[in-house]
Amino acid sequence: MPRPGLIACMLLAWAFNSAAEEAATVEGYATCAAYYFNETNVTPVTAFERVYDAGEFAFNQALQQSTRAEVDKLVGDASARMTQLMSEDWRKFDRVRARYAADCRALVGTAAP
């Protein structure tokens, strides 16, 4: 039978891993929300609603696991990273797409473009 100290350590490790996984998911959804909202700036009008909806879905998923203030901060930080990645030039959005599109499609699912 495991000792009480070992059980406490195992529970603490499980709780830490769960919190880390949840934070990663919140950050992932927030990053994808930023990606899709930014993607709308370079999306043809015919696909705008689908792209925006994917961003809104990701944002709402993040909100289910965190506060509005935290999600807003994460989305803003991710958007700033994306702006830097494309050197503040929307004609270079393909750099952002290359970095984030596949991960966001995988996270958001079939709702994503």
Image (spheres, rainbow, N blue to C red):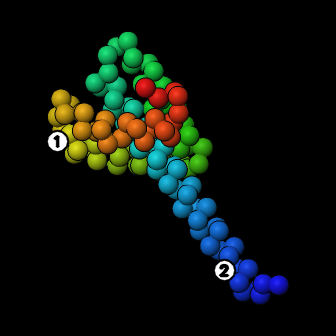
Residue at 28% across, 24% down: 42
Q: Do the residues labelled 1 and 2 touch (CB within 8 Å)?
A: no
Q: In which quarter of the image is the C terminus?
A: top left
| Position of residue 73 in the picture relative to residue 43 (left or right) | right
Q: What residue type is labelled 2?
A: Cys
**What secondary structure is marked by label 2?**
helix
| Residue 25 horizontal/vertical position (percent) | 52, 50
Residue type at mark 1? Answer: Ser
- 71 vs 92, left or right, is right
Q: Which residue is rendered at x = 38% and y = 12% of the image?
A: 46
Calculate the distance from the C-alpha at mark 1 to the C-alpha at mark 2.
46 Å
Can residue 32 be seen here? Answer: no
Which residue matches tag 2?
9
> In the figure, residue 49 lies in which quadrant?
top left
Q: Mark 1 points at which residue?
A: 87
State the residue lying farthest toward the top. Answer: 46
User: Which picture quadrant has residue 84?
Assistant: top left
Q: In this view, does 40 lie above or below 35?
A: above
Q: Residue at x 32, y 16 (%)?
A: 44
Report x, y in % for residue 73. Answer: 41, 49
